[in-house]
Structures are given as structure tokens and as C-alpha cells.
Amino acid sequence: MSTMRGIAGWMIVLACLSGCGYNDLQGLDEDTKAAWSEVVNQYQRRADLIPNLVATVKGYAGHEKDTLEKVVQARAQATGVQITPETLNNPEAFERFQNAQAGLTSALGRLIAIAENYPNLKADQNFRDLQSQLEGTENRIAVARKRYIDRVAEYNKMVRYFPTNLTAKFLLHLEERPNFAVADEKSVATPPPVKF
């Protein structure tokens, strides 16, 4: 009789464990880390292109020193803020990373705009190649961020939904992860004025 109770007890424990989401949470945790690694990889690719781009622009527009220095400073800030998958649970660190990358994006936009004032620079094959690579990298960043956003959404749902939230909180000590956000949602929601 006690053997039957023991077997029945183990069957109940196993049935409870199968619904706890332990393996699903572990899998989603790894998926978000992998997606984050791809985001970082694409940002690093962009950072690696910048020295060549700055050098090319400097050859044609050396007196644009202020803009070139801002790009170099923004790159240094962006590469100086490192977030590992383990620190992704820190919203402040995530926001610092996102702000540093946004600063670099803004500085690069100003650098590319300079090319409009220099026809010889716009015609330079090296500049055009670098600009094309940079545009491709920006697209890759957007795709990698989208994949990360999707993975974090799945992960955060599992961390919050019952009964997996119990496993996440008490067994694995998992918390929701921050996600990318738009700095000024009101400005994005307002359509830009079109003037002819």
C-alpha cells in the first residue's frame, strides 16, 4: 500500500513539473540571449565601419572637424557601454546602452548629411561603398532588434503567466527583461508635415 502511495505521489509531482514551464523558460532565456548577441554583433559591425567612414570624409571635408569629432566621441560612448546577456535584466543599464546607440545613430546621420555639401565626396567610390555598407548594417540592426523584441515579449509572457510565473520567480529567480523603446513616442506618433 505504501509503495502505491509513493508511486502515486511521484506521478503527481511529475505531472506538476510538466506544467511548470521549467524547460520552456530555460529555452526562452537562451533565445533572448542569442537574439541579444545578434543585436550587439550588428552594432559592433556598425562601429567597425565608422573609422573608415570618418577617414574618408576627413579627406574631403577636413574642416568639418566638429562633426567628425562628435562621431568619434559617439562611437567611443556606444562601444564603451557593454551589456552582457546576464545584465539584460537591469533596465538602467539597458537604457544607457540604448541611449549611447541612439547618440551614435544621430552623429552618423549628421556625418552622412555632410556629404551633400561635397560633390567630390559623394562621387568617391570608397565613400559610396562605406555608405552602402552602413545602410545595410542599419537594416541588419533593425532586423536584429525586431527579433530581440519578439523573443523578449515571449520570455516576459512566460515569466508573467501562471503557472510558469511561479517557476520563474521561486525556482529560477527570473524577472521580466527590458525591451527597446522609442525615446519620444509623441513625436513618432505625430505625422511629419509635408510641404511642397
Image: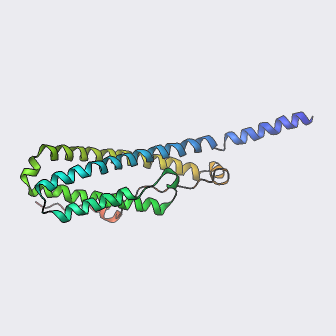
Percent coordinates x, y for residue 84 in the rendering: 48, 52
| Most distant residue in the right direction | 1
Percent coordinates x, y for residue 104 in the rendering: 30, 58
Q: Dividing the image into 4 quarters, which one contains the C terminus?
A: bottom left
Q: Residue at x 14, y 58 (%)?
A: 114
| Most distant residue in the left direction | 119
Residue 183's place in the image compared with 60, above or below, is below
Percent coordinates x, y for residue 27 in the rendering: 56, 41
Q: Dividing the image into 4 quarters, which one contains the N terminus?
A: top right
> How many numbered badges does the structure rendering display?
0
Q: Nearer the viewer, residue 107 or 75?
A: 75
Q: Nearer the viewer, residue 150 or 45?
A: 45
Q: Residue at x 35, y 46 (%)?
A: 42
Q: Nearer the viewer, residue 121 or 1?
A: 121
Q: Nearer the viewer, residue 196 or 119?
A: 119
Q: Residue at x 10, y 51 (%)?
A: 121
Q: Residue at x 51, y 60 (%)?
A: 90
Left or right: where 117 falls relative to 139: left
Q: Quadrant of residue 179?
A: bottom left
